[in-house]
Amino acid sequence: MVNWLEVEVKAKVEDVARLRRKIKLVADFIKTESRGDDYFRLEGKGYPSKAFRIRDDGKKLVVNFKKHLTHLWKEGVVVKREFEFELSDGKHLDNFLALLQDFGFREWVKKRKQTEKYLHKKDKRIVIEINHVKHVGTYLEIEYLAKEKDVEKARKKILETLAEIGVTKDQIDNVGYTRRLYEKGVKDRKYFITRRKK
């Protein structure tokens, strides 16, 4: 089984219409989608060192967690190893939530995101997204799935794409969305998946 790495960069967007025009010159629009991510952490105070999410895209529920490979970070481009599995139905979700509770995990924050997805015309492995994150703002994300031996190539492609659409390195902002929500004190508890199950 190939273990892909997620090579990516993020930047805050001030002029969405201008960025969208530039993206369409180099990439093809694929789709718009809404995602709801419920993040869980072990009980405790402060910002957690580790957390994972259950993503609900309206069709399926996927458990996801990422390991930050900081030794591969360079020039503002971050690298993560991603792990995920699907919860196939409501019974599996109920059982998984019961397991989490028994192990001391608690639902921590809800991230709600509207995404415009594009694929680069010259390299379909380059995914470009405009993400509007509730309570946080609008961000550009460029992602490239790569094997570890190809991380440098992926980084180069991402930086080239940033230049193509007029985003400079000083505009890169890789602070996580959950960190932004935490700093704002936003949890959006009323949208928690655990609350919906009650």
Image (cartoon, rainbow, N blue to C red):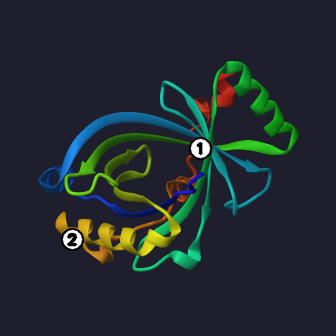
Which of disc 2 and disc 1 is earlier in sequence? Answer: 2
Q: Which mark is residue 51?
A: none
User: According to the image, label 1 marks what residue?
Assistant: 187
Residues at circles 1 and 2 in contact by the CB criterion of under 8 Å: no
Along the line of sight, which residue is nearer the eye, 82 or 195?
A: 82
The secondary element bearing badge 1 is classed as loop
Image location of residue 147, percent across then percent down: 49, 63
User: According to the image, label 2 marks what residue?
Assistant: 163
Inspect the image, locate mark 2, and give the three-letter code of the amino acid beneath it. Ala
- Residue that appears at 65% across and 21% down: 89
Label 1 and label 2: CA atoms lie apart by 35 Å
Q: Residues within 10 Å of mark 1 (few under 14, many from 20)?
A: some
Along the line of sight, which residue is nearer the eye, 108 or 165?
A: 165
Residue with the most extreme right position: 102
Please, is residue 73 above or below residue 19 in the view?
A: below
Query: In the rendered view, does 11 fall on the left or right side of 101?
Result: left
Q: Nearer the viewer, mark 1 or mark 2?
A: 2
The secondary element bearing badge 2 is classed as helix
Query: In the rendered view, does 115 fall on the left or right side of 122?
Result: right
- Residue that appears at 65% across and 49% down: 52
Quadrant into which the C terminus falls: top right
Image location of residue 83, percent across then percent down: 62, 50
